[in-house]
C-alpha cells in the first residue's frame, strides 16, 4: 500500500462528486485495472507499478469505448 493512494482515493471521490453535481460521466480506468484481492493495480498492466503498458492501455481503451458507446445515440 502506497501513501499516495490515500491522496488519489480522495481525488477520485472529489472527481465523482463533481461529475454527479454537473451530470458528467467519469471514465473509471482505476476500477477496471484494480486487483481487488491485492488492493492495487493488477499485475501485467503497468510498466513501472504506476504507468500503464500496452496491456494497461488496452484495458483503458475498452473502458472508454464502452462508456462512449453507451453515451452516443444509437445508429439506426
Image: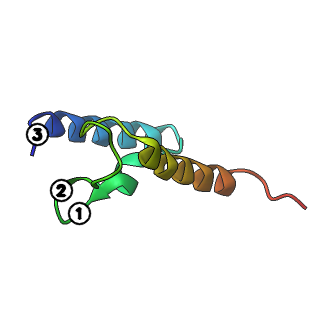
- Earlier residue among tags 1 and 3: 3
Q: Secondary structure at mark 3?
A: loop
- Earlier residue among tags 3 and 2: 3
Query: Disc 1 vs disc 2: Cβ atoms closer than 8 Å?
Result: yes
Q: Secondary structure at mark 2?
A: loop
Q: Is residue 52 left or right of residue 1?
A: right
Picture coordinates of residue 2 (x, y %)? 10, 39
Q: Is residue 66 left or right of residue 52?
A: right
Q: Is residue 47 left or right of residue 26?
A: left
Quadrant showing the C terminus: bottom right
Residue under label 2, please give it: 39
Question: In the picture shown, does residue 72 fall above or below 3?
Answer: below
The label on residue 36 is: 1
Q: Is residue 33 left or right of residue 65?
A: left
The label on residue 2 is: 3
Residue drawn 59% across the image and 52% down it: 67
Query: Disc 1 vs disc 3: Cβ atoms closer than 8 Å?
Result: no
Circle 1 residues within 10 Å: few <14, some 14–19, many ≥20: few
Amino acid at each position: 500500500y502506497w501513501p499516495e493512494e490515500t491522496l488519489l482515493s480522495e481525488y477520485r471521490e472529489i472527481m465523482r462528486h463533481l461529475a454527479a453535481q454537473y451530470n458528467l460521466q467519469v471514465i473509471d480506468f482505476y476500477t477496471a485495472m484494480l486487483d481487488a484481492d491485492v488492493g492495487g493495480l493488477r499485475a501485467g498492466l503497468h510498466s513501472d507499478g504506476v504507468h500503464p503498458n500496452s496491456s494497461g492501455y488496452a484495458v483503458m481503451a475498452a473502458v472508454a469505448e464502452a462508456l462512449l458507446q453507451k453515451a452516443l445515440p444509437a445508429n439506426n
